[in-house]
Every structure is written in C-alpha cells, then in structure tokens.
C-alpha cells in the first residue's frame, strides 16, 4: 500500500471479488479513512495503473488535500 498508494485484493477474501482501497489522511497525517472500490474479478481491472486505480487514488489524494494533508 505504501509503495503503490493503494491496497489491492483479487480473489483473496471473497472468491470472484477484486478491489482497491485508497487511504485518506487528515491534516496531521493520520489515516482518516479508506475509500474502497470493488467488483467482480471478471470485469474489475486490478491493474495498478488502470483507470479504476488512477481514479480512486486521485479522489483519495484530493480528499486528503481537502482535509489539510500535504504529502512530503
């Protein structure tokens, strides 16, 4: 998660389900929440650089910025 900026699962917790989780940080750099996107492994793209991953990470980064977090 630290390396990619996202957590990813595919057929791990539930067979046939894949997903990403992106961390959102508050102004002090503490984890405020995790934003999840998930779907069927048959159609859900788990590519680290795919459109779903990029959109989720972008949204989480914007939420963090809105909460006052400034990455080093």
Image (spheres, rainbow, N blue to C red):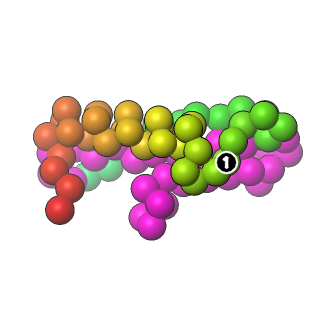
- Mark 1 crowdedness (10 Å alpha carbons): few <14, some 14-19, many ≥20: some
Residue 42 image point, x, y percent: 84, 37
To which quarter of the image does residue 59 belong?
top left
Residue 5 image point, x, y percent: 43, 56
Instruction: Please provide the residue range marked out in magenta.
Output: 1-29
Tell me the residue that label 1 is attached to: 46
Identify whether 37 is placed above or below 5: above
Residue at left offset 55%, top offset 51%: 49
- The one nearer the camera, 48 or 13, is 48
Residue 44 image point, x, y percent: 72, 37
Look at the image and tell me whether residue 19 can be seen.
yes
Q: In which quarter of the image is the C terminus?
A: bottom left
- 58 vs 9, left or right, is left
- 36 vs 57, left or right, is right
Identify whether 32 is placed above or below 47: above
Q: Residue furthest bottom?
A: 3
Q: Number of numbered discs present?
A: 1
Q: What element carries label 1?
A: loop
To which quarter of the image does residue 67 belong?
top left
Look at the image and tell me whether residue 33 can be seen.
no
Residue at left offset 19%, top offset 32%: 66
Residue at left offset 38%, top offset 39%: 58
Identify whether 69 is placed above or below 62: below
Q: Is residue 42 magenta?
A: no
């Amino acid at each position: 998660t630290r390396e990619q900026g996202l957590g990813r699962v595919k057929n791990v917790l539930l067979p046939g389900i894949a997903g990403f989780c992106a961390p959102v940080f508050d102004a002090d750099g503490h984890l405020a929440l995790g934003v999840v996107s998930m779907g069927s492994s048959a159609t859900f793209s788990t590519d680290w650089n795919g459109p779903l991953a990029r959109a989720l990470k972008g949204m989480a980064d914007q939420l963090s910025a809105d909460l006052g977090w400034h990455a080093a």
